[in-house]
Image (spheres, rainbow, N blue to C red):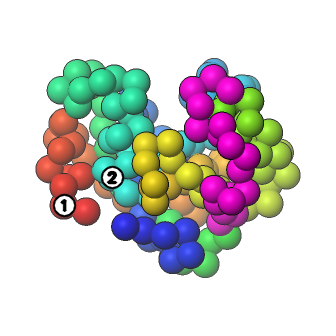
Amino acid sequence: MWSPNEPVDFIWRIARREDLTGSGGQRVSGRWHTRPKPVVYCAADPSTSLLELLRYVGDAWLLPDDYVMLKIGVPRGLKMEIITLDDLPGGWSDKAAGYAICQPYGDDWLLSCRAPLLCVPSVTGPNRWNVLINPAHRDSSHILVDKVIRDQPFTEITRET
């Protein structure tokens, strides 16, 4: 399992869109931001990406046909800010109350443009991490989609990693 103290070569995302513009974050608030800020939610590994999505969909076989998995390349040396469990108060992972706790952290990171990447704990389980991309950061242009995977329900890919 990956740790934020290690370099990351790839991050993963399951979505309808194959771009990294953050347009979804402009329409809808998430755990780590308030709209209308552009942000791209990814995961440190494919299985966490799928688990995050399953929290909303329920079953991988119920994914709409137009969803794809993106393998996203992250250049070595790209700055990543890290928020650990030690940085967060209790209740951060609660469904409703947790958003109010986490959103100020993400909004501050997005607006400050301190780093193109923000690593945050995933609510899907211990030692699982999400990685957010700030499309407004000048170095985010170096973060590129490496591969588009269309083979749903993505269970083979998540078992391989």
| Image vertical order of residue 156 relative to residue 96, above or below | below
Q: Earlier in the sequence, mark 1 or mark 2?
A: 2
Q: Is residue 98 above or below residue 138?
A: above
Q: Residue at x 19, y 36 (%)?
A: 153
Secondary structure of the residue carrying tag 2 is helix
Q: Looking at the picture, how far across and down is residue 156, in whole percent?
A: 14, 50
Residue 142 relative to residue 101: left or right: left
**Could you tell whether 112 is left or right of 92 in the image?**
right
Label placed on residue 116: none
Q: Position of residue 103 (x, y in %)?
A: 73, 36
How packed is label 2: few (under 14 Cα within 10 Å), some, or many (20 or more)? many
- Residue range corresponding to the magenta coloring: 80-97
Verify CB contact (< 8 Å) between mark 1 and mark 2. yes
Q: Measure the C-alpha gap from mark 1 to mark 2.
A: 9 Å
| Mark number displayed over residue 160 | 1
Nearer to the camera, 34 or 99? 99
Q: Is residue 85 above or below residue 63?
A: below
Please say whether residue 35 is one of the residues in the magenta stretch: no
Residue for point 55% across, 68% down: 4
The secondary structure type at the circle numbered 1 is helix
Residue at left 71%, top 39%? 102
Residue at horizontal 31 percent and vertical 50 percent from the top = 47
Q: Which residue is mark 2?
A: 46
The amino acid on which the numbered mark 1 sits, given as a three-letter code, is: Glu
Q: Quadrant of the C terminus?
A: bottom left
- Asked whether, in this view, residue 139 is left or right of residue 144, the answer is right
Q: Is residue 69 visible?
A: yes
Q: Position of residue 27 (x, y in %)?
A: 63, 21
In this view, 135 is above or below 73: above
**Most common SS among magenta residues:** loop
Label 2 is placed on what type of residue?
A: Pro
